[in-house]
Amino acid sequence: MRDPLLLSAALVAALAGMGWLALAMEAHWPQVFAARGPTPRTSRMLRVLGAAAIVTSLVLCLCVDHATMAVLVWIMALAGAALAIAFTLARRAHWLRVLLPPRCVAGPG
Amino acid sequence: MFQNLRLAMAWLHTWFGLVLGFVLIVVFFFGSLSVFDREIDRWAIPASRFEPQPMPSFEQVLRPAFESMQPTRAAIDEMRPRVDGPMPERFDTVVRWGAYTTHRDPVLGVFAGYEVPGAKDPEDSIWADRTIDPRSGATLPDDHLKIGSQFFYPLHYSLTLNWYSLGYWIVGFAALMMLVALVSGVVMHRKIFREFFTFRPAKSRQRSTLDLHNLTGVVALPFHFFFAFTGLVIFAGIYFPVTHTQLHALHDRHEQIEAQETGLPHDRARQPATLASVDAMVAEAQRRWAAKGMAGDVGFLAVQHVGDANAYVSLYRAGTDRIALTGEGIHFKASTGEVLREDPPTTAVGSINEFLTGLHLQHFRHWLLRWLYVLGGLTGCVCIVTGFMFFVEKRKHQHAKQGEQGARVVDALAVTTVTGMLVAACGMLVANRLLPEAMPQGWPGRGDFERYAFWALWLFAMLHAFVRSAPVARGEANPAWREQCVAIAVLAVAAVVLNAATTGDHLLNTIPRGYWPVAGVDLALLATAGLALVAVRRLARRATAATGRVRNAEAAHA
Amino acid sequence: MTARIATPRLPLLLRIAAAVFGGYAFAWGMIALAIAVLYAAGMAFHDAEHLASLVALLVYVATFCWAFVTRSLARAWLVLAGGGAVMAVAASFVQHLIVP
C-alpha cells in the first residue's frame, strides 16, 4: 500500500509544481484569478514553490523504485502534469485557485 | 539555398514531418498499444485468459514439448532456396531450444532451431515455434494470432513489411526524421518557455491547432526524443551492419576470443551425451541470484547443442525490477549440471546500452510507468495529427482559390492514418470475435483472416477518405472525419459486446474479479468509443455552423 | 513557410540526397572507424559497437540538419560522402593492422 500512496503523492506534487510554475507566468495568472498579476515577488515565490514541488516529486519517485526507473516515472509524470495544467488553463482555469490561498492573491505587494 | 537557419529548419520540419508523419503516427499509435501487447493477446485468445505463470519445470513440461516439435511446412518451404540438394523430411540435430516468458505471460512461447544438412551457410538453421500452456504442456492452436505481440507490435517496428526488411528501414528513417523534426521544431519555436502551458481553443482553428502541436511536442519532448533515439539504437545493427560486412574479420576474431574466454563451446563436439536435470540448474541459478539480492524468476531458458557433449544450458533472470535489460546469465554444462560461467557485471557502456534499450522495450513491472508511456505515445500521436491539420488549415483556403489539390490529398491521407487506422484496429478485434475457433480444412489460418480484415478495413477507410474529400478543395471540412468516428464508435462497442457474448468475460464479471488484462482492453475500447462520439458531436456542430454561414452568405448575395 | 519556397528542383533533390545518403555514409564511416579504433585501444568489442552507434546516430541527426543549412551543396557532399569514405578506409586499415 505504501508504494501506490507515494507514487500518487509524486503525481500530486508534479501537478502542483507545474501549476505553480504556470501561475508565476504573466499569461496565465489573469486566466486563473481574472486580475492582473502576479507581482514580481509573488512570481518569484511561485517559481521557487514550483521547483520545490517538482524536486519533491522526484524524491518521492526515488523512494519507490530503483533510481533508473524513478527518473523515468518522474519525467513522464512531469509531462502528464504539464498537459493537465495546460488543459485546465484552457477550459477550467479557475480550478487552479486551489493552489494559492486567497489572501496571497488579494494581498499587497 | 535557404536564406537563414530558421527557414531551412522550417522547410525540413514541414516537408519531412509531413511525409514521414504518415509513418510516424502508425509507429506511435501501435507503439502505444504495444505497451499492453500481452493484455491485448489475452483479449484476442480467450483460451489464454488465466494468471501469468512462472517458467514451468523443464523435465515435466518443457522437454516433452521441445522433443515433439518440428518445423512447419511453410518454414521448410522458406528454407528450401537456402539449401543445396534435397530438404530432409525430419530435423533431428537441435542447435538450440529456447523458452521465453515475462511477468505478464500466462502462456509460454517456446522455439527450437535445427541444423539443416546442405545449408549454403553452415550457421543457418531452421526454426519451429509453439505456444504452450505451462500448467499442462498442452499446445495452443498455432493459427491463433496474438494480436498484441504478434501483430500490433511488429506493425510498430516494421510495418509488417518483411520484404528485404523494407519496413524496418522505413520505420528507421521515420525515427531519424522524428529526431530531425524535434531539433528543427525547437529551432523554429520562438517561445518554448513562454508558451509552455499555452493552449487557446477559443482562438482561430489554425492558431489553436498550432498551440496543441507545440504543447504536445514540447511537454513530452524528452519522451519523443528518447523513444525515437532508443528505437534507432535497438536496431542499429540492422541499419548499420558494419561488423557483419566491412569489419567482418574483426567480428570473427572477437567471437573466437570470446568463445575461449567464456568456455562456452561455439560448435558441437559430435559426440552424443545425456542431459542432466535442468530443474536442478534452475534451482542453483535462483540460489546464486538470491545471494546477489535479486529477484529470481527465470525469464529466458536456452539449451545449446542439444544432445551433444558440448551442450550447455543458459539461464537468464527476468529483470522486472530494473529498467535495464540485464539477464545476469548463468551457464551450465548440460551433461553434468556444473556451472561453466556466470556473466560478469556489465561495463559502463554496456549499462548505458542496456538502460536505453530497456527503457524502450519495457520488461519491467511498473503499471504506472506503462500508463505514462501510453500517455506519451498518444501525446506523440496528437502532435503528429495536429501537424497534419495545421498544414491543411494553413493552405486549404489558398489551395481552394488556386484550384490546387494539395490540401485535399493531405487531409484525406490524414483521415486514413488517424481515424482509418482506428477503424482497422477496432475492426480487427471485431473480426477476432466473429471468426470461428477453427477454420475449415485447407483455408488460411484464423490469424490470417484477422490480418486480412485489418488491411481491408484500412484500405476501405482510405478509399472512403478520398471519395468524400471534395469539400476540402472548396476550403471546407471532409465529412469522412465524422463518418469514420461513427464507425470507430460502432466497431469499438461491437468488440466489447462480442467479447461478452462469445466468452462471458464482460465487465461486470472481469472488474469484480480483478481480471484487468481483459477488463482493461474493454474499458479502453469503450473510452475510444466515447471519445469518438464526442468528436462526432463537435464535428457535426461545426458542420452545421459552416453550412449556416454559407447559407447566410448566399442569402446576402441573393 | 506560408508561401511555398520557390527552389529549383535539382539542387533540392541533390541536397536531400546529400542529407540522406551522404549522412548515412558519414555515419557508417564513423561507426566503422570508432569500432576499429576503440577495439584496438582495448575496449570490449560489443562496447565499441554500442558506443559507436550511439554517437553516430546522434551525429546523423546533426549532419542531416546541417546539409540543409550549409550554403554550398558541393561542400555538403564533400564533407559527408567524402568524410564517410575516408573514415571507412581508415577503419579497414586499422582492421588490417589487427587481423592481417
Image (spheres, rainbow, N blue to C red):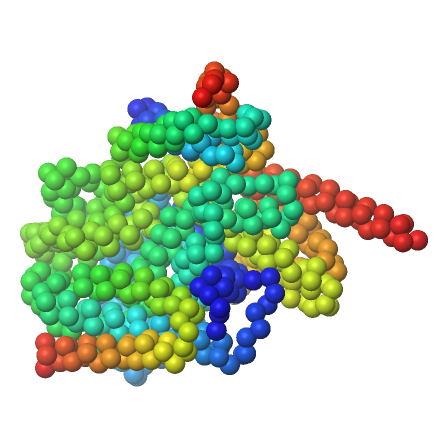
Q: Is residue B290 left or right of residue A22?
A: left
At x 93%, y 53%, the residue is B558
Residue A15: image location, x then y, percent: 42, 31
Q: Is residue B71 above or below residue B27?
A: below
Residue C39: image location, x then y, percent: 13, 68
Q: Is residue B454 left or right of residue C96?
A: right
Q: Is residue A107 visible?
A: yes
Q: Is residue B33 above or below residue C42?
A: above
Residue B168: image location, x then y, percent: 40, 65
At x 60%, y 61%, the residue is C2
Q: Residue furthest right?
A: B558
Residue B124 placement: quadrant = bottom left
Q: Residue furthest bottom?
A: B85
Residue B414 placement: quadrant = bottom right
Nearest the camera: B445 or B424?
B424
At x 59%, y 41%, the residue is B200
Nearest the camera: B150 or B242?
B242
Q: Residue furthest top?
A: A103
Q: Is residue A29 left or right of residue B290?
A: right
Residue B476: image location, x then y, percent: 73, 55
At x 50%, y 61%, the residue is B10
